[in-house]
Amino acid sequence: MSVTSEQVESRVVETLASFGPDESQITRDATFEELDIDSLDLVELAQVVEDEYGVVLKGEDMKDLKTVGDAIDLIVQRAG
Amino acid sequence: MASMPDRRKVVVTGLGAVTPLGIGASTLHERWAAGEVGIAEGAGRCREFEAKEHLSVKEARRLDRFAQLAVVAAGEALAEAGWDGEPPYDPMRVGCIIATGIGGQGTLEAQLEVMRERGARMVSPLGIPQYMPNAAAAAVTMKHKLRGQSYGVVSACASGAHAVGSALRMIQYGDADAVVCGGAESALTDFAFACFNSMEALSPEGISRPFDARRDGFVMGEGAGMLVLEDEESARERGATILGEVAGYGSTTDAHHLTAPDPTGDPASRAISLAIRDAGAEPSQIDYINAHGTSTQLNDAAETAAIKQALGAEAKRIPVSSTKSSIGHTLGAAGAVEAVATFRTLITGVIAPTLGYEVPDPDLDLDYVPGEARPLVTGNGHPALALSNSFAFGGHNVALALRGAAR
């Protein structure tokens, strides 16, 4: 099953918004630092992604992610 | 006992509470004194507390309810102390001790459910940081940038009082200039009710009526009480309003039974005597006792025996009332919530009654303040001196001696 970048983006934005930041701030270019999204939030995001797309992301995979776009691209690539 | 003539005096500059009677330390005392009962359907829930009204989305979702209650009560206490945003001291000299009896019970149960339903991989990374018993201390220190000693304290229903006593010692000993201290609990889950019910500790009627002949168990509550304690000299230098003094602390252990108090009240009475002596006072100077008063047969009898043993002939003169008659038993928060209520008693000069006390138990013969609130009468123009008792499953006994501010 392949997923589109738009589908992943929508799911990622929705999930991140539930962690606290305002949805309007969550763009592809926004950094996790700006959004006050930390390593614990990213583990929760990874759980949502695994549940939804069957993509397993470890801490090691996440540690170099800087922006929301980085995360979306990684998920789309692994799901594809 | 070794004397410590030059130890520092410790004053209170801020109070905060979230309880079944509502948000706020003065709300707690005012409503209790007016005869309001915060218990409904057998539980003392903080029904007026909505996390989202006080905390950001991020704060709220990262904290178990017990820590949410602590953060909100601490915010109130710090605002009253006049610390807007930053501590008035070197942050490394400001400590934080927050007690709980149980910790994040709701989180633990919810994540156990997740594991059973959806597998271990789906358990939240926020599980441990939410249910660890030190989570409230961690949250308050992070929010207010307190960087001195901080930790949680656990001694069941004496936890909150141990936190205040430990904070007192931390400042007296010079390890900190100020400490934000207190207790928080929120464990009103079906599982916790089942556990306490199996012990036959809870009132089948769901009524908290301490010292009454008909008392049949405690009513579980939730809440938080927080105090800002400061070295007196430092507080005066910064021009703080002094609300009162944590004058003495005494603590002992029954080593008798896992849950039942020592019926003689011996070790508990020793804790009371130690607190009075630690305050440099005599039984004749005690103006009020805020009892542990749980509404169980055993506690209320043993506590009465302990008070009589510690205070001798003075015992029958002193008004004794129980906050639990209004809000139930907030477990690990109780000692701190009741210290807050006792300070509000000293500040307002109003002793709130033991609500629901109507049928005297022939064996319990102290003045339990039946009926209505009454004025706090002090002996000889000195600031009033009160005791706040806490006794716990496990046999932990704590008494705090709390003094009103000089007028």
Image (tube, coloured by chain):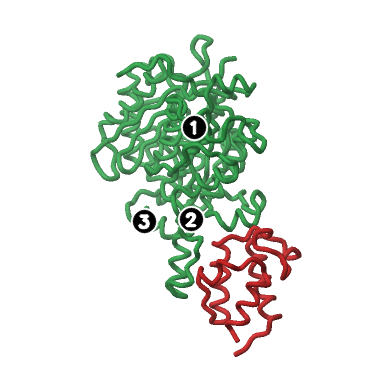
Chain colours: A red, B green
Q: Does residue B31 show up?
A: no
**Which badge, 1 or 2, comes first in the chain's sequence?**
2
Report the residue marked by disc 1. B339
Give me the chain letter of mark 1: B
Q: Does residue A72 show up?
A: yes
Report the residue marked by disc 2. B129
Disc 1/disc 2 C-alpha distance (Å):
28 Å
**Label 2's element?**
helix
- Residue at 58% over, 23% down: B235
Residue type beneath disc 1:
Ala
Residues B73 and B261: in front is B73
Residues B11 and B141: in front is B141
Left or right: B11, with B253 as reference point? right
Asked which quadrant contains residue B388, the reply is top left
Give me the chain letter of mark 2: B
Left or right: B61, with B134 as reference point? right
| Crowding at mark 2 (Cα within 10 Å: few <14, some 14-19, many 20+) | some
**Which badge, 3 or 2, comes first in the chain's sequence?**
2
**Label 3's element?**
helix
Residue type beneath disc 2:
Pro
Q: Position of residue A6 (x, y in %)?
A: 71, 80
Disc 3/disc 2 C-alpha distance (Å):
24 Å
Which of label 1 and label 2 is nearer to you?
Answer: 2
**Which badge, 3 or 1, comes first in the chain's sequence?**
3
- Residue at 41% over, 46% down: B101
Q: Are marks 1 and 2 on the same chain?
A: yes
Report the residue marked by disc 3. B195
Which of label 3 and label 2 is nearer to you?
Answer: 2
